[in-house]
Amino acid sequence: MSDPRSSHAPGYLKDASLDLTARFLPAIATVALVVVSAIAYTIFNNNSKYPLANPPGWFQTKLSKRIEFLKDGNRILGEARKRYGGRPYRLITDWGDNLILPADRVTSIHLEKKLALSPAVHDDFHADVAGFSPYGLAWIGQNIARKHLTKSIKWTESIVMKDVLSLISRISSRVFLGEELCRNEAWLRVTRDWTVQSFEAANLMTVCPGAFKFLMPRFSKKCKNVLAIYNEARGILEPVIERRRQLKAEAKRKGTPIPIFSDAIEWAEIESRGNPYSAVDCQLNLSFAAIHTSSGLLSQVLTRLSNEPHLITPLRHEIIEVLTAEGMNKNSLYNLKLMDSALKETQRIKPDQMLNLRRMATDNVVTSDGLEIKKGQRVVVDLGNMVDSKSYSEPEKFDIYRYYNWRQDPATAVKSQLVATSADNLTFGHGNHACPGRFFAANELKLALCHLLLKYDWELSPDASLEALHPAAVMSILNPSNKIRFRRRKAELDIDGLV
């Protein structure tokens, strides 16, 4: 029997299509409404009275704007800064939807307890993803930082960032982990590699939808490397910690004095107060904070001084004068005021990030000056004033005397110190969540510079450049391949013999 539809195909198809349309019209309308609503929500919703500087266009998503910011963040931020001047506004960055505040509004938020640092860092550095968990263990590290830290005569060429990373890793590990691990080359390599690679991978992962982040260690080569380095760190550190715990347990059982260790492993045990925690996460978190902060600043100041070696002479004179009179101690490091100024000027002239002081509102907030911040809103502060002629004379000039001169004026003396935080320089943050390790970093950097400047001459290699690179979003770095040249000199005093 022939199919009755075959002799009337056009009419049948028309009727069938009408029937199907009628049947599925509610579903089609629902899907269309959802799509249109989603687009409208993406474009128009702000849950805030502050304007969005870079809203998605039709059929764009916030994810596409985050990727765009990751590629061209400095231009986007610069245009928004011009458009809104000193007014708060919102910006879709690689971190998501952020409320951008000018630096002069920082005093309205810096002590607000409902604007928390930890949730923002936890999200931005993906602490739930395997291999990135050290970013989620800031609280022990913060307590440790607050309570427990604070021969060749020829020219030799050095890749400054690479060699400074090694130097700072070794110095920091000596303080954090004692003699056993500070000379363990495998541990030093692991802390360097995890710091650099986890930071790079975390920045790339900011544009990955949250539901898929846990898959990244399986499919992303960078994230695989981070997880492998993390597991290697566990293999090195956990036996050391277990051995210490056994020594303590055995001493307690025998009634003999319990061994005392003065390093960050022991400090973490104290600060955990018996609560479960990952010792590996804690040590990598501390290492990241120390290495990332100190290596970047030390490599920059060495590069800039090598570019203007005449500036090294007054720094050497200060080192000789202060250390000859006072020896090598905390007080003498404080009195290296020109060196302090040179370090702070290095921070100012090229901030690592033009957006800092990241926070997340844990509840609705109305600040003392009327800022209304909704729960869940991210907040960051624009550091553009640090390179603005309205705030600094000749902001493009590297002036190692800038903060030294400010320090002579009682009105600006305190905020001119490297470790001081204020709206004028927010590199170390400000308020409740100012970097607790900045005092340790300042002493570490000054100690390193005393040795490096007294023992060696420095100059910039001909092919090196001071032009900033912008690898992603609003990050700014000197070329990590820059080379500087150094040669041994006869030091004016025996710095190694100072006590």
Image (cartoon, rainbow, N blue to C red):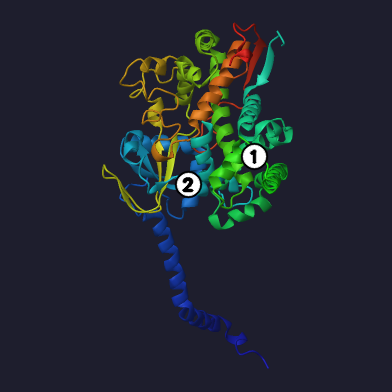
Check disc 2 and report its element: helix, strand or loop: helix
Label 1: how many residues lie within 10 Å, few (<14), some (14-19) or many (20+)?
Answer: many
Few, some or many residues within 10 Å of mark 2 (<14, 14–19, 20+): some
Q: Position of residue 131 (x, y in %)?
A: 64, 48
How far from the left and from the top, in percent, is residue 73? 47, 38
Q: Quadrant of residue 198?
A: top right
Residue 466 in sight in this render: no
Q: Secondary structure at mark 1?
A: helix
The image shows a total of numbered marks equal to: 2
Tag in front: 2 or 1: 2
- The reply to whether callout 2 and callout 1 are in contact (CB within 8 Å) is no
Amino acid type assigned to the residue bearing label 2 in the image: Ser
- Residue that label 1 marks: 194
Please tell me whether residue 330 is drawn above or below residue 266 in the rendered image: above
Amino acid tagged 1: Trp
Give left or right: position of 196 versus 143.
right
Work out whether residue 394 or residue 162 is closer to the camera in this orientation and state it.
162
Left or right relative to 402: residue 216: right
Foreground pick, 428 / 251: 251
Q: Which residue is mark 2?
A: 118
Question: Quarter of the image holding residue 270?
Answer: top right
Give the percent coordinates (x, y) of residue 238.
69, 45
Residue 18 at x, y percent in the picture: 48, 80
Q: Residue at x 32, y 16 (%)?
A: 409
Is residue 339 positioned above or below 161 on the image? above
Q: Vertically, is 243 above or below 262? A: below
In the image, 227 versus 73, the foreground residue is 227
